[in-house]
Amino acid sequence: MTDQELFTYAQKACEKAYAPYSRFRVGAALLTKDGKVYTGANIENASYGATVCAERTALFAAVLDGRREFTAIAVAAVQPDGAYASAPPCGICRQALSEFSDGSLRVLYGTPQQLQEASLGSLLPQAFGL
Ligand SMILES: [Zn+2]
């Protein structure tokens, strides 16, 4: 699977976002080591703290399906005006992803025309661990 294909999954997941408050729709596509893709979208709540990001909905769906080894995640974000935003995962999602990655997880984000890439380890160099 190419990076662009994985990003396309994230773009499609954006359409399922529930974002009536921010109108900032985010989709994520998480690629397992064996090539399966799990998608997620942000799900907001009137009690803002109950909101969940796209990256974590994808991660939780994958883990619930028995997957724990991942190679890449793509994140697509669409602003209220319909333009793509370059949005790497937030701190909470970086930490959540680090539970299942040694830091080598490839993180793809940006726009369809200009994908950016970073390793999870570079985005979260000192992840919390017990
Ligand atoms: Zn997040």
Image (spheres, rainbow, N blue to C red):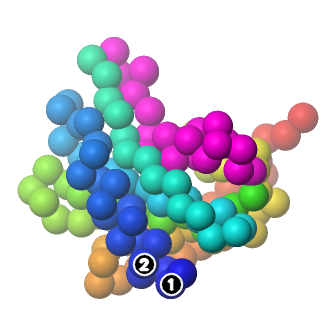
> Which residue, given by chain and number where applicable, does mark 2 sit on?
5
Label 1 secondary element: loop
Which residues, given as a range, are shown in magenta?
47-68
Q: Image quadrant of residue 109? A: bottom left
Q: Position of residue 101 (x, y in %)?
A: 76, 57
Q: Position of residue 51 (x, y in %)?
A: 40, 28
For residue 20, above or below residue 96? above
For residue 20, above or below residue 27? above
- Residue 55 included in the magenta stretch of the image: yes
> Which residue, given by chain and number where applicable, does mark 1 sit on?
2
Look at the image and tell me in which quarter the C terminus lies: top right
| Mark 2 CB near ligand 1 (8 Å cut) | no
What residue is shown at x 66% (from left), y 63% (from top)? 32
Left or right, 46 with respect to 4, comes to: left
Q: Identity of the amino acid at label 1?
A: Thr
Q: Identity of the amino acid at label 2?
A: Glu
Q: Is residue 87 visible?
A: no
